[in-house]
Image: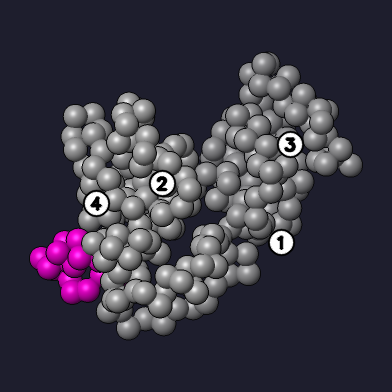
Amino acid sequence: MSESVFSGFPARAEVTPVPNLFFTEVVPQVDSINELKVVLHIFWLLSRRRGYPQFVTASELSADPILGRGMEPVGAARKEVLCQALKEAVEHGIILHVRVDRAGQVEDAYLINNDAGRDAIIKIKQGDLPELPPAPVPNDMQAAVPNNIYSLYESNIGMVTQLISEQLKEAETLYPAEWIESAFKEAVALNKRSWRYILRILERWATEGKDDGKFGRDTQKGRDREKYVKGKYGHMVKG
């Protein structure tokens, strides 16, 4: 295990939702630290997945470097430890297990034992989900946690509400991903942690050009941006 000491959570750290029942009903059942680590890691991964159904496969977990660093013992025995931890989590009813056929390859898939997970299991077994989502390749931290506009907002500003989510989705279609990330960084550096301020940065770059030499988007994008600023959310981002 690492000897380094954790430096502490930042003021606006991104959070992973975990049901309260996890602490009152699940934790008392957990037999090993590896089972607890695997279950929490699955909650973390699936909270960032998009699409339906949301599941993670044994091969993804086995290749995940973040989970791997926390599993004991290290080395060749780690795969067996992971399999045992998953087996315990399924036996305790925390995680659901199903075999899925993804592009002709059968894999062990794991889902959270909630309404969505149970419904997905039924549909998978009935063959009602012919096209399952492709497997991500968690070869590093960026692969495990995509640095999209939603994670940027949660990490630097706060929880994404339904209204903010709609605004972020629209902004993501209007501005390049690198602009959005740069705008967040600039706002944080100036201690201006608000979506309104970040949007104004993006608007300025779209009108005046950014320091990378790229000037305003094409005409249609410009019209789209005007619609965004002057539309139903305009009163929230102007003034």
User: CA gap, disc 3 to disc 4?
Assistant: 46 Å
Q: Give the magenta part as a residue range.
A: 66-85
Secondary element under disc 1, as helix, strand or loop, is: loop
**Residue 215 shown left or right of residue 17 in the figure:** right
**Residue 3 shown left or right of residue 23 in the figure:** left
Q: Earlier in the sequence, mark 2 or mark 4?
A: 4
Front-lying residue, 174 or 115? 115
Which residue: 20% across, 65% down?
84
Contact between labelled residues 2 and 1, with CB atoms less than 8 Å apart: no
Q: Amino acid at mark 2?
A: Arg
Contact between labelled residues 2 and 3, with CB atoms less than 8 Å apart: no
Secondary element under disc 4, as helix, strand or loop, is: helix
User: Count of labels shown?
Assistant: 4
Q: Which residue is mark 2?
A: 118
Q: Which mark is residue 58?
A: 4
Question: Where is residue 33 shown, x and y percent of the image?
Answer: 31, 76
Q: Which residue is mark 3?
A: 204
User: CA gap, disc 1 to disc 4?
Assistant: 42 Å
Depth check, mark 3 against mark 4: the one in front is 4
Q: Which residue is mark 1?
A: 191
Depth check, mark 3 against mark 2: the one in front is 2
Q: Report crowding for label 2: few under 14, some 14 to 19, many 20 or more residues within 10 A (C-alpha).
A: some
Contact between labelled residues 3 and 1, with CB atoms less than 8 Å apart: no
User: CA gap, disc 1 to disc 2?
Assistant: 44 Å
Question: Where is residue 38 shown, x and y percent of the image?
Answer: 32, 64
Q: Earlier in the sequence, mark 1 or mark 2?
A: 2
User: CA gap, disc 3 to disc 2?
Assistant: 47 Å
